Image: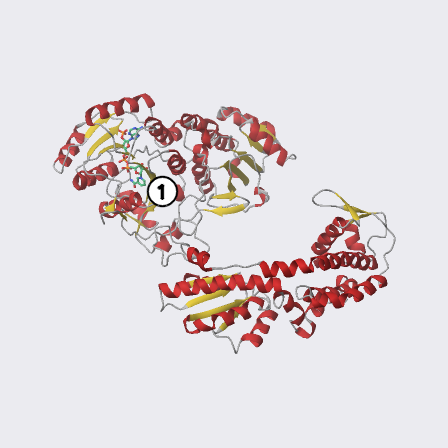
Amino acid sequence: MLIGNDPLGYKQLTARYPQAVSLLLDGNESIEQLTELLREAGPIEHLIWLAPTTLAQDGDTDGMIRAQQGGVLGCFRLIKALLALALDQQPLEWTVITRGVLTVFGEASSRHQVVTEPVAPAHASVHGLISAMAKEYSHWRVRLVDLPEGDGWPNLDPLLLPADPRGDALACRNDVWYRQYLAPCLPLGGAVGRKGKVESLYRDGGVYLVIGGAGGIGRLWSEYLIRTRGAQVIWLGRREQNSQIDATIAELAKLGPAPRYISADASKYAALQQAVIQISAEYGRIHGVIHAAIQLEDQSLARMDQQRFTAGLVAKVDVCVRLAEVFEHQPLDFMLLFSSLQSFTKSAGQSNYAAGCTFKNAFGHYLAQHRAYPVKVINWGYWGHVGSVASEDYRRRMAEVGLGSIEGEQAMAALETLLARPLSQLTFLRTSRRLSDTFSSLELPRHPAGPFGEYGEIRPEAYPSLIARMKKHLVVDSKGVRATTQQAEAQRATIDALQGRLLYSQLQQLGWFGREREIIAEMKQRSGLMSMYYRWIDRSLDELAQRGYLHMEGGNSPTAYRVINPQPLAIEPLWTEWEAQKPDWLEQASLKAEVILAEATLRVLPEILDGRIAATDIIFPDSSMAMVEGIYKYNPVSDFFNEVLLDAMVEFVKGRLEQSPETPILILEIGAGTGGTSARAFEKLRPYQRQIGEYCYTDVSQAFLMHARQAYGLETPTSVISFSMSTSLWRSRVSRLVVMIW
Ligand SMILES: NC(=O)c1ccc[n+]([C@@H]2O[C@H](COP(=O)([O-])OP(=O)(O)OC[C@H]3O[C@@H](n4cnc5c(N)ncnc54)[C@H](OP(=O)(O)O)[C@@H]3O)[C@@H](O)[C@H]2O)c1
């Protein structure tokens, strides 16, 4: 069953999956109405829900609050309707699709290209809800997909993706699929400024507004800022100022300026605006804003009503949006959003909090793109001694999953790191067990490349990049190779045309092209073509069509062809013509290897295609590489490219050795094949022999590896080791990998 929440989305879904039952909703349907609609639609096995369309660039923050109605709240009511129909007892498949919610290329990095991708945070809250739901209803198979903005659809049908018991999202960008992982960060302190001092976004005597400042973490943060910066802190909370707040203010006033408390609901624009006007009148400019508000309303989905769900959500969504609106034109030093590890764990029983936190993360990224000041998100782990969950019972439950209590000093240091570095988001947690055990108990996804995958951006660069050096020193002169290839161009055209005719004639031998029109699938069967050559024949038919022998039918994936001229094409005259011209071709270094290989294979093509002869017996006669080798070396084109590549490698090696003369260099060549590139690489590396720790010659084919051992094993300057491309072996080496030749 397809559920679209706006006409545009509905149209996309029904066009993609025309066979499914579909519902177009407007997002305002009550649980009762949805229950009725679902009942009428009949049995449901698979529910596909597409989030309503929103535009990231429209700058309508207010619209993000309204969007929750048809988005996360619509989804919440849908779940409640399914529960009302007792579908929680049955297996059910879910595919939930959002667009542009996740920031895949967000962080500036030395290794990754910085890409400003549009973020549309309105429906990021759906991610928290769906993932918590997946944990509460573990027999529902949940697939959560974040497609790019717009109306494009990935080549891989999202329905073919595996369901995820954690309900975590897979994001598709440019047809590549991404998963989110936490990566460790090494705190290095702040960035060093001109005067040699660590730069911080905090300023001495700054004025800071903390939403929820009278709460646990807000109070602790305030204490730190008053103590270290003499900051004037203003707290906003909904309750009236009471004796407890008075006592805290008096306590903190011993350290510096007394915090000021204002009673206001920050989820209401007018109340927040009024408070900000008041603060500006009293203290002048506000330098920083901290969103530390929360309304904890934990409950299982089965028992949660919409009012409760919304109450938890508003403290995150509405407060974020109102802050963005009120501070749109204020010259802040920073805005800091307190979010939670819960954005990644999305635990059962906390669907509204998870929804609020996933929204807050995405909104932080969105706002960072739209504001002149830095907007940063910190995802706290568990605070056991201050704040909303500082109880004995909670501490015990957290300890069971390996979470210890965060303490003030380290937490404040983590914040300093986040604020001083070019990071937009940081998670800070304390574990009471080994990090990997805690990750396991929390069911946090592990990076496939190791327990925690890549290091975060904050890791120092071991060695500065050498790209600039390589660009400067690499002189590429392609004049020679261009002249040689141009010379051979006319001959290449003749060879190609003749090869086309030979191919056509040889395929006729196998029974192809005898009738005016043929169905390709039938011909594949009838001609006795081995199935491993099906892709080859598709490509060959395409080639023959381009050469005017055939007319293909069926668009991009042709199903039949028409033969332009069904007359048999005699093969003997073609070979006579080939033989007559061959001596000239063999004189051209750039054509020779190709001509020899083409002739050898074309002569026995029918036998290869129907399996009487193995292609490898022709290409590698007596296990010799001689026939293929000439394609990859001893010919001007491949020699030219090998030279450019290897000059770059040598330049890199030289640069690395200047940076660190004692560190041995490991070189990994992926897909080394006959060694066309390697042989020359070994020669070029000879002067650096002592500093090369290892040259890994890799290929998926054992035959190539055996050939390499024989051909290069003894005389290479480095120990050649070889292994197939099952990645487990080289993964462990990658941390010290220096050069990769592809
Ligand atoms: N404690 C943890 O272990 C933990 C873990 C991860 C993340 N966090 C995050 O850290 C932040 C602080 O948490 P905490 O544990 O210190 O919470 P807390 O002690 O409950 O304090 C939260 C404060 O937010 C205020 N608040 C809620 N809604 C508001 C609104 N609409 N307008 C103005 N004030 C509002 C509350 O005061 P009123 O009720 O008077 O409005 C309360 O004082 C939250 O953002 C939370 O999500 C906490």
Q: Position of residue 602 (x, y in %)?
A: 76, 63
Q: Quadrant of ligand 1?
A: top left
Secondary structure found at label 1: loop
The percent coordinates of residue 739 (x first, y second) are 46, 62
Left or right side of 429 for 475: right
Q: Name the kind of residue labelled 1 in the image.
A: Ser
Residue 604: tell me if it is visible. no
- The residue lying toward the viewer, choosing from 660 and 234, is 660
Pointer 1 residue: 424
Percent position of residue 524, x then y: 77, 54
Q: In the rendered image, is residue 628 in sight?
A: yes
592 or 169, which is in the foreground?
Answer: 592
Q: Residue at x 79, y 67 (%)?
A: 579
Q: Is residue 102 above or below residue 593?
A: above
493 left or right of 436 in image: right
The x and y percentages for residue 146 are: 50, 40
Residue 120: quadrant of the picture: top left
Is the residue marked by circle 1 packed among few (<14), some (14-19), or many (20+) residues within 10 Å?
A: many
Instruction: Single out the residue that lies furthest toward the left.
Output: 254
**Residue 217: quadrant of the picture:** top left
For residue 279, side relative to residue 470 (left or right): left
Identify the residue at image location x=48%, y=69%: 695
Residue with the most extreme bottom position: 714
Quarter of the image that includes the N terminus = top right
